[in-house]
Amino acid sequence: MPKKMRRLTLAEQTAGHLREELRECGRKLPGVNALAAEYDVSRRTMRSALLLLEGEGLVSAGGNGRPRTACIGPESQAVDSERKLRVGVLLAAGMEGEDPAFRSILYKLQLDLEKRGHEFFIAGKNMREMKGDVRRISKYVAQLSADAWLVTSGSRPVLEWFASGPVPAFACGGRSSGLRIASAGALADTVLRDAAARLVAIGHRRITILSPRIWRDPAPAKMVRDALLEMEEHGIRTGTFNLPDWDETPGGLYALLDALFATTPPTALLVGRTIWLEAVKDFLLMRRLSVPDQVSLVSLHPCHEDAHWQRPLIAHGLADDAAVHRRIRHWLRSLEQGKDNRKQYQIPMHFVETGSIGPIHPDAQ
């Protein structure tokens, strides 16, 4: 009679995932609480998993609450995947349109995949060039013969098509909630709401959100609705002034700003893409409007590292970009093993208030 195979415990499965990651890149492990949140398990399960790895000599306990240290690194074991993958990236608006942090993630993924013998490429056309048209996008994607797709900031219709197709796909941001598609993205909900709440609290009534189209089309995303509701709860009647529709091009952005500041200008701008921030700052400089004396400014995503040399530092959202990188890597490792992994992860963001936010200037009342 064949011997019945024992089912692995959750702690053993968690230890296996950690073991794979440590052998691939090696890193100093954070505390139990952070690891448990990252791997979506209880602290008790994570402690058991770490004890298993300690018993194998793969990690050493730091003691007195200090982080554990990995005892193995990338050079200690060559990884030979049985299944080689051709992984494509479909960008929302080209590499220049991606936030610097995500460009760094893509670069690291490329190095990791090519090291493991996989093929990595970025599609020559992006979704904006194809007008977000699902028929055009689907036809184009089919011609590229990828084994897996990473889709950045995809609209709901585009992600619905990928979710229903035969080729595995991973949504990097975008409107993926509730779809059967793997995803990870920074959860900007609290950043947008907290920024709006703070601005209202110090007297701002004319607040404009410069949002990507996917945040407002075909209907405002939940995080946008929450921010507008925050304004409405303080007596602000919201409309297209607060969430304008515009053409997401350099010319379209300047045309929108010209229109907004023509008569009754906003006293605060919430900028939904890091790449738009410099253009907004240039516009304000040309109008001789200072931040925050005359206009408060918030970036809803992390600022580029160069921004820390500037004053005032722009208020911004902050997330663990390394966590997004790890989630994509876990998904790709599942594909190597022939697993259908469609788990969705939301990476928390928090609002960092800086000197770019201030009370309303008396002349703007």
Image (spheres, rainbow, N blue to C red):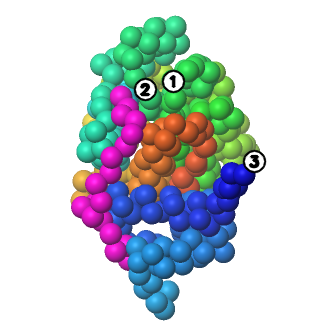
Which amino acid, mark 1?
A: Val
Task: Indicate which disc, 3 or 2, sits on the residue closer to the N terminus.
Answer: 2
Q: Within the magenta stretch, is there residue 174?
A: no
Reading the image, the residue beneath label 1 is 167
* SS state under label 3: loop
Who is closer to the viewer here, 161 or 332? Answer: 332
Secondary structure character of the magenta stretch overall: loop
Q: Within the magenta stretch, is there residue 81?
A: yes
Q: Is residue 221 visible?
A: no
Reading the image, the residue beneath label 2 is 147
Q: Tell whether label 1 touches label 2 (CB within 8 Å).
A: yes
Q: Which residues are magenta?
A: 68-86
Label 1: how many residues lie within 10 Å, few (<14), some (14-19) or many (20+)?
few
Residue 314: image x %, image y %?
38, 54
Residue under the image location 57 percent in, 62 percent down: 14
Reading the image, the residue beneath label 3 is 233
Task: Indicate which disc, 2 or 1, sits on the residue closer to the N terminus.
Answer: 2
Which amino acid, mark 2?
A: Asp
In the image as oriented, which residue stretches furthest toward the front? 1
Residue under the image location 64 percent in, 70 percent down: 45
Label 3: how many residues lie within 10 Å, few (<14), some (14-19) or many (20+)?
few
Task: Indicate which disc, 3 or 1, sits on the residue closer to the N terminus.
Answer: 1
